[in-house]
Amino acid sequence: MTDEDPAGVRSASTPRGRARRDQLVRIGLDLLAEGGWSAITARAVADRARIRPGLLHHYFNGLPGLHVAVAQRASEMIVDPVVGALLAAPDTPAAVQALRALVPEMVAGERNLRLAAELLVRALRDPRMGAERRDWTRAVRGRVATRLEELCPDWPPERREGTAMLVTALLDGLMLQLILDPGVPADPALSATAALVGKP
């Protein structure tokens, strides 16, 4: 076996425990990209990590918890860099330029394409995963609205919140379009959104 403790009770909060947890999530991501959610079984993960399947309960409270952790990591990899660049932009033209550069990267390559597709499908079919996705979307909307308050202090709250919803929907919609048609250009949608946001 591996470096697990004999009793299998090493805390997941220790550095070694966090490293093990991260390893299991990375294995889950690999399996998800290879064969979808059905490929992430306790046995498949345990075999690749060379641990006992029961340790998944220790680190994630079971396989469903690992699935959630994998979905969270996939979102961090695919969408969070785009959101971060958007929030760091000093104005609308810079935000659009950041999106032009980063949006195509969300689903660049077969691995990201498959991960993005699996995320959307699972969020629609699994109530727990759907709730995770909802909470993530609400958090992104809140961060965008807060940034808009800094950049556009004269805007009323409903405009900031509406714009934040529009931006979040744009990211989700572009990701779906790129999944269905990876060659579709994102520039026209980004330019149209910038024009809408910039209107008085």
Image (spheres, rainbow, N blue to C red):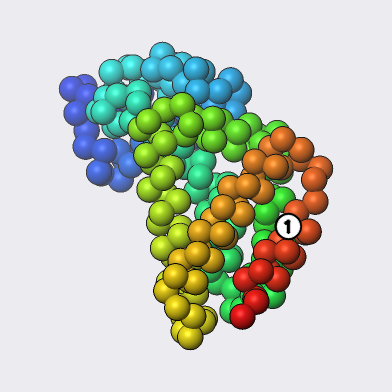
Q: Write the residue at 56% across / 52% down.
A: 169
Residue 29 shows in this picture: no
In the rendering, at what x and y percent does residue 57 appear? 27, 24
**Crowdedness near tag 1: few (<14), some (14–19) or many (≥20) residues, C-alpha within 10 Å:** some
Position of residue 73 in the picture relative to residue 104 (left or right): left
Residue 105, relative to residue 109: is it above or below?
below
Q: What residue occupies the far top of the structure in this picture?
A: 43
Q: Write the residue at 72% across / 50% down.
A: 104
Q: Write the residue at 45% across / 51% down.
A: 137
What amino acid is at disc 1? Ala
Position of residue 142 in the picture relative to residue 35 (left or right): left
In the rendering, at what x and y percent does residue 27 appear? 49, 29
In front: 31, or 48? 31
Q: Quadrant of residue 134?
A: top left
Residue 6 shows in this picture: yes
Position of residue 115 in the picture relative to residue 145 (left or right): right
Residue on which the image places disc 1: 189
Residue 136, relative to residue 53: is it above or below?
below
Question: Which quadrant of the figure contains the C terminus?
Answer: bottom right
Position of residue 98 in the picture relative to residue 45 (left or right): right
In the rendering, at what x and y percent does residue 50 appear? 41, 20
Q: How many marks?
A: 1
Q: Quadrant of residue 190?
A: bottom right
Q: Secondary structure at mark 1?
A: helix
In front: 55, or 70? 70
Question: Which quadrant of the figure contains the N terminus?
Answer: top left
In the rendering, at what x and y percent does residue 109 appear? 72, 39
In front: 61, or 163? 163
